[in-house]
Amino acid sequence: MIFNMTGLGDFIVQDAGTNILTVTDDGRILFKTYPLAESGKEILRGMIPILGFDLPAQTATTSYVQISRKVNACDFPSSPAGATRVYKFVIRYTDNLPTASSTNWQVSTSTGVAYSTFTLPGQANSDLDTGTVKIVQPNAPGVPCDTYPWWLEVQSLPPYPDNKIKVFQIFLAAFDRID
């Protein structure tokens, strides 16, 4: 069936008087009241581990340190027409930095220049035994998933004398953002 609507108004499918499916006149699609498709909505397409240890990796350096293995290709399904690929890291970590400070992270490649960067807030966790999870999107251009090899690096910031960061797990997630 093709419904060619002209003018204003929504197309609504109901069951016993309750809206089940709505297509708004501006193109949004709702299941009951939950938006299924609208501009800006992100849909998870896949997730791959890029770091995971039984015992976490720990560093106290104030220089950048490679924290993940080198990734040559991500092998996610292609982004469909009408969507833009967005990569985010899911990181479980802790540190003993004050909450007012942060750690710097960078996606690096063999070019020797940081491809993209982001920061994570200090956790002020003196025993370093428990972790917190953060989902972060690196600054543009993001992650060169299938362009050339890349890896993730972390830097603990001075001037704090005994600053340490422990990284338990890192995943790379691929989302499609509806245009």
Image (cartoon, rainbow, N blue to C red):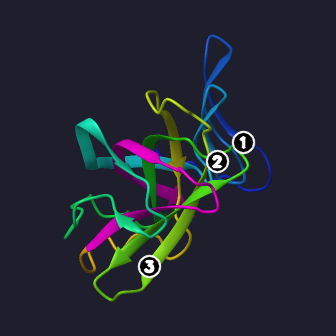
The residue that mark 3 highlights is 115
* Magenta-tinted stretch: 150-179
Query: Most extreme residue toward the front, as rendered?
Result: 161
Q: Which residue is mark 2?
A: 28
157 lies left or right of 77: right
Determine which residue is flagged by label 1: 10
On screen, residue 48 above or below 125:
below
- The image quadrant where one finds the C terminus is bottom right
State yes or no: discs 3 and 2 in contact (Cβ < 8 Å). Answer: no
Residue at the (64%, 47%) spot, across then down: 28
Is 48 placed left or right of 10 in the picture? left
**Residue occupying image coordinates x 58% and y 62%:** 157
User: Which amino acid type is marked by label 3?
Assistant: Tyr
Q: Secondary structure at mark 3?
A: strand
| Residue 114: % across, % down | 44, 80
Q: Residue 14 or 136: which is nearer the viewer?
A: 136
Does the segment drawn in magenta span residue 174? yes
